[in-house]
Image: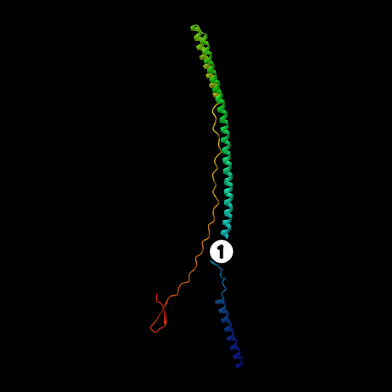
Amino acid sequence: MRTKQIFTTSLLSAGLILGSVSVANATDPTPTPTPVATTTPVATTYAAQLAAYKVALASYQVAMDQYRAAWKVTMDQYTAAVKAAMSQYQAAQQVRQAKRQAIISIFQAAVAKADSDFANALAVATTADQKSAAVAARNAAITAATAARKTALDALGDLARPVLPVKPIKPAPPVKPVPPVKPEAVKPSKSPKAEKSDNGKKIGKNK
């Protein structure tokens, strides 16, 4: 009988122990370790930024060379077009001036002939009617020469100014990359100075 009581007591004790363990597991589970995010050291980050900046700077210099070369070609073409237009205008102006001078020369020759004919007529004129006829002939010749000159000059017309090409607008240059900011070195903090107490031992300095 006593053996049975001892066995029953053992079973109850074991049950209580297992129950306590189950409750403990349920209420206080083992926490899962949280992964720690790794941070890139500042020096490594700056070195990477500096390397990227050097690559960008080299690309910028190449782009600037291409930009200057392209702009030079554009301006050379514009200058050449302006010179060609002005050269054509000057050539046309010289041709017009030559034609105008020819018209004036013809007019002057007609006036000179009218004067010469008038002088010859007066030299042989003996009556007033003959002299009046000589004057009328001279005036008619000069009037006809003047009208012919005007008609020729009107036909010649004015020389139009040359149409020059529009000056190109200089485009914006490539944007120069900005260098990275160099991180400052972190200085170690100084520890507070220790003071000696009355018994000779060092103590921390009160703030």
Q: Residue drawn 55% across and 61% down?
A: 50
Q: Position of residue 22 (x, y in %)?
A: 58, 79
Q: Nearer the viewer, residue 148 or 33?
A: 148
The extreme left residue here reads: 198
Q: Nearer the viewer, residue 31 or 42?
A: 42
* Quadrant of the frame with the C terminus: bottom left
Q: Which residue is mark 1?
A: 47
| Quarter holding residue 94 | top right
**Figure check: 72 above or below 199:** above
Q: Position of residue 140 (x, y in %)?
A: 52, 14
The extreme front residue here reads: 123
The extreme bottom residue here reads: 2
Does dot 1 land on a helix, a strand or a loop?
helix
Q: Position of residue 154 (x, y in %)?
A: 54, 24
* Quadrant of the frame with the N terminus: bottom right
- Observer able to see residue 1: no
Q: Nearer the viewer, residue 21 or 56?
A: 56
